[in-house]
Amino acid sequence: MDPLIELLRNNSNRSPKEIALALGVAESEIAARIAAAEADGTILGYSAVVDRLKAGDRRVTALIEVRISPERDGGFDRLARRISKFDQVRDCFLMSGGYDLAVIVEGKDLLDVATFVSEKLSTLGGVLSTATRFELKAYKENGFLANGGGDEERLPVSP
Amino acid sequence: MEYDNKISNIIRDLPRSGIRDFFELVIGRTDVISLGVGEPDKPTPWPIREAVIRSLEKGQTSYTSNLGLESLRIGISEYVTKHFRTTYDPKTEILVTVGVSEALDIAFRAVLNPGDEVIYHEPCYVSYSPSIKMAYGVPVVVQTREENEFALMAEDVEKAITPKTKVIALNFPTNPTGGIMPHEELAKIAALAVKHDLLVFTDEIYSELLYDGRQHKSIVEFPGMRERTILLHGFSKAFAMTGWRLGYACAPAPLREAMMKIHQYCMLCAPIMSQMAGIEALKMGETAYEDMRQSYEQRRNLIVSRLNGMGLHCFNPGGAFYVFPEIRSTGLTSKEFAIQLLEKKSVAVVPGSAFSSAGEGFVRCCYATAPELIAKAMDLMEEFVNEVRGKK
């Protein structure tokens, strides 16, 4: 992978100047490459990874296992894209195994998610079944441990 | 009681480590960005820690063979074959030690008679000269110089050789400079060792951490060297295992046996928990450190350009995780620079003079620190350098 993209995946918050020094290329080139990656859809967007509990976010998240019937032209794509367009859907992946789509849904409470599943998702043509699993607690998100996890003490000066 | 005459002359006359002096200035302060450490900024990779937890649950808490667990020695043999293209017999030629520090200590004690000379290079890690003295040897220093990017020049080594010389001790990449050895210079030093029938101790602790696509080559790989080399290596730096204190020595059987005699009486064996960690580390191999190595390389680029940008001349070191900028242009000694930077800007670096007089005029900055902190430390250091220069 492009080392610039790798670097941004780990921390998108670094300044183009700092990235330029780290990779040994001109700052203007970094800015141009980032702009190009944003323009061609390589970079989809940026967001902070938040400890939702600490942020006081009381919304609920659920993983919906969805089985769908593939279509003659395009397989799962058309229906998967349709499902992805709902604002409630945070992530949507095609999976191997016992079901087809893993759909991560956020709602303001259980009822909100349940309503979305029963009224929007399962009523779509081609959706065969859904199984809803609510998230209880996040221990690690996008590679970051909740509660930091890094309390290891290091001496300030060592040989 | 008068204790001075109760303490051995050798120990009484040993200087305290300069790092320790500086450590005591920093300890207890919580506001400091430290570039003063000598270890990775991440804890030991989780699979290694997890393997040790499992081993403790199984009750593996006993002594091991003095030599170290056989499965660990087999793993070490395979690793050394791959990385140094030199094969050692796990049964007769490998000894597991408590860090490279122990390995170095017992290697000196195993070969030196009182008055034997050991050639080593400065600036270097703080233990070389004391370890030689504690083994009743005579340390003979060869200075490495900034103009050679702190590589050791064979012609300087040759000038230091006398009829009493027994060992040449090498450590490349080097702490504190990050200097590495050009292969052609290493070949010349190998030829000198063969010509004068000398032993060579090569401390390979930073050998995995090389940048810009370089391949490491050890002196043991040159013709005639295997029989006269003690290869010292450990897990601390590449595998982020400094606190486990696990190292090893690879040497021809008679040398290994001599070291083993000391090790069995003074240390018995390396802790089994650490040995278990070592076994898992070797299973992980390069995957345990390759991402970190790449990240270090980027951090090195960042810190080297920032230092040069603020007018502190700094060569681009090929290995380890230290940079060694020259600070003479500020008009301060390296100790003054480090102390004032700590007091005024709360950034800790280690004075080069802690690594021998050859380090005067330089400071050691470790870049095994988060890039955000490096950037912040560099901003503060730049402010400090401008203030010092403004005053002049």
Image (cartoon, coloured by chain):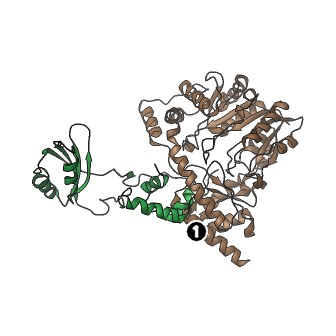
Chain colours: A green, B brown
Q: Residue at x 70, y 49 (%)?
A: B179
Closer to the camera, B29 or B129?
B129
Give coordinates of residue B31: x percent, y percent. Answer: 54, 65
User: Is A134 positioned to the left or the right of A4 in the image?
Assistant: left
Q: Is residue B36 visible?
A: yes
Instruction: Using the image, determine if residue A94 lies above or below residue A7.
Output: above
Residue B225 relative to residue B293: left or right: right
Amino acid type of the residue tagged 1 in the rendering:
Asp
Residue B28 visible somewhere in the drawing: no
| Residue where numbered disc 1 is placed | B379
Q: Is residue B123 left or right of residue A33?
A: right
Name the chain letter of the residue that bears numbered label 1: B
State the quadrant of the C terminus of chain B: bottom right
Q: Quadrant of residue B248?
A: top right
Instruction: Please state the horizontal and vertical placement of residue A3, each as a whole percent of the image.
Output: 49, 52
Above or below, comparing residue B222 to residue A114 in the picture: above
Res. B128 image quadrant = top right
Q: Of B333 and A155, which appears nearest the observer?
A: B333
- Of the pair B366 and B353, the residue shown nearer to us: B366
